[in-house]
Amino acid sequence: MNDIFVSVNRFFDFIVPIADFLWEFPTKEAAYSAIPVLGKLSFVVLLLLGTGMYFCVKTRLVQVRRFTVGLGIMLNKKASSAGISPMAAFLLSSAMRIGPGNIMGVTGAISVGGPGAMFWMWVSAFLGMATAFAEAVLAQLFKQKAHGSYVGGMPFYGQFLLGKRRFAGVVLASIFIVYALFSIPGQSFHLFTALGAVAETVAGQHFDRSSEVYWGIAGLLVVGVTITVVGGLKSVTRVTDLVVPIMAGIYSLLVLIIIVINYDLLPYFFKTVLSGAFAPQALFGGAFGVALAQGIKRGLMSNEAGQGTITIAAAVSENDHPCEQGFIQAIGVFLDTMIICSMTGFMIVMAHLWTGDAAVGWESIKDAKLTVFLTSVRHLVPNVALHDTVTVILASCYAMFAFTTLIGLILFAEIAANQISQHRIFIRVIRLSGALLFVPFGALAVLAGLELGNLWAISDLVNIMVVFANMPLLFIGSRYVFLCLEHYHRSGGARFVSREIGLETEVWK
C-alpha cells in the first residue's frame, strides 16, 4: 500500500511549484519584493483585498448599515419546499468557513507575522464582508431549481454573466467540482489528527497510525460521511444545523473561560496586536509588510470572501429578496474571522510563547501549528490536572470543524454538478465519489503513515483556480448587485421581481 501512495504522491510533484507560483506571484521577483509593504503581498491577495475595498465603497459599507437587518432576517425567515431557511444556509456556509484553518491558519499567521497579523486579519474580514455580500446576491439572483430544490452559485451566475454560454457554465462547474473533491483528503487528514489526539489523550498512550484505533476512526469516518451526504441537501443541513452551533459555542465558551482566568493579560493582548500591526518584532521578520501580508492572507483564506466557494450555500436559501442572503453572508464572515479566529488569536498572543516566559523552545515548535496552539492553551490553564480535559475538548471541536467542512465540500460539489447535468445518476456519482473514493483515499493515506504533501498541494492549486474564476465574475456582475441593493432600499425590502432591474431570471419572476 505504501508504494502505491508514494507513487501517487510523486506523480503530483509538478503541482507544488505551480501552486506556490500562483499564490506567491510576484513576491519572488526581486524588483517587486523590494517595494516596501506592497512587495510582501501577492497578486491574488491584492486582488481579494482590492475587491473588498471596491464593494465597501460602492455599497457604502452595506456590511455595517445592514448588519442588524441581516440578523433579523436570519432569525425570522422560514424555509420553503424548494429552499432551506436563511439560518440553515448561514449554518451551512459557516460549516465550510469554520474549519481547521480557524486554528491552524491563525496560529501560522501569528507564528510567522507576529501578533500584528491579528489586526490585519480583522481588516481583511471587514473588507471581505462586503465582497461576501456581493457574491451572495449574485448567487441568489441567478439561482435555479433542480429536483424541487434550489441550486446555484458561482458556476450558475458565471454562465449568465458570460453571455449565457453553456460551455462557460460547464467549465466553471468542473473547476468547482475539482476544487471540492480534491480538498476532501486534506480535511480527512485533519479529522484523523484531531480524533487521534483525543484517543491518545484519553488512553494516555501513543497509537501507531496502523493501529486498530486509527482503523476504527477510518471506518466511522467513511460510514458517517456516507450516511450524512446520501440524503443530499436536507440531510447535510440537518447535521450542520446541529453541529455548527455546538462546535462554535463550545470552542468560544472554553476560550472565553480561559480569557477570563487570564484577564490580566488582556491589556498585553491589545497592546501587542496594535503595536505589532505597524512595528513587528524582529523575531517575526521585523517588517511592517510581514504582519500585514500574513494577516490579510490568512484572514481571506479563512473566511473565503470572494473565492466563490460559499456561493453555493447562499443560493439554496429561500428569501424574499436577493439582498437578504447577502446581508446574512456578510455576518458569516464576521462570525468566522472576528469571533472564531479571534478566539484562537487570544490564545496564541496571550500565551506569547515566543518570549521564552513559558520555558518552551519556540524555535523547535513554531512550525508545528497544532503544537503551538495546544501548548499555548495549556500555558494559560493554571490547573495542570485540567490540561488533558481541555485538550480533548479542543481536539473534538477541531474534529467537528473538519467534519462539517468535509460534508459541505461533497454537497457543494453535488450542487455545482447540476450545472453540467441534472440527471440523478450523474449527481449520485459525484456525491458517492466524494464519500466512497476521496474520503477513503485520505483515510488510507493516514493509515499508511504518509503526509502526501504533494497531493495536499492540489487543494491549494484548485482553490486559487476558483479565486481566479470568480473574481472577474464579481466585477462583471457588480452592476446587478448595485441594482439589487438600490431596489432593496427603494422598496423597503419588498418581494423582489427581477424584471424591475431589467432581468429575466428563472426564479425571481
Image (cartoon, grey):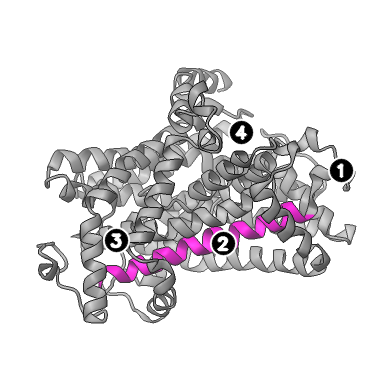
Q: Is residue 476 left or right of residue 88?
A: left
| Mark pair 2, 1: CA separation | 28 Å
Q: Nearer the viewer, mark 1 or mark 3?
A: 1
| Mark 1 crowdedness (10 Å alpha carbons): few <14, some 14-19, many ≥20 | few
The residue lying at 71 percent from left, 68 percent from top is: 256
Part of the protein shown in magenta? 321-350
393 shown above or below 29: below
Q: Is residue 280 left or right of residue 15?
A: right
| Mark 1 or mark 3: whose residue is earlier in sequence | 3
Residue that mark 1 sits on:
356
Residue that mark 4 sits on:
447
- Residue 317, position as x, y percentages in the image: 31, 67
Disc number for residue 315: 3
Q: Which amino acid does label 1 sit on?
A: Gly
65 shown above or below 346: below
| Mark 2 crowdedness (10 Å alpha carbons): few <14, some 14-19, many ≥20 | many
- Element under disc 2: helix
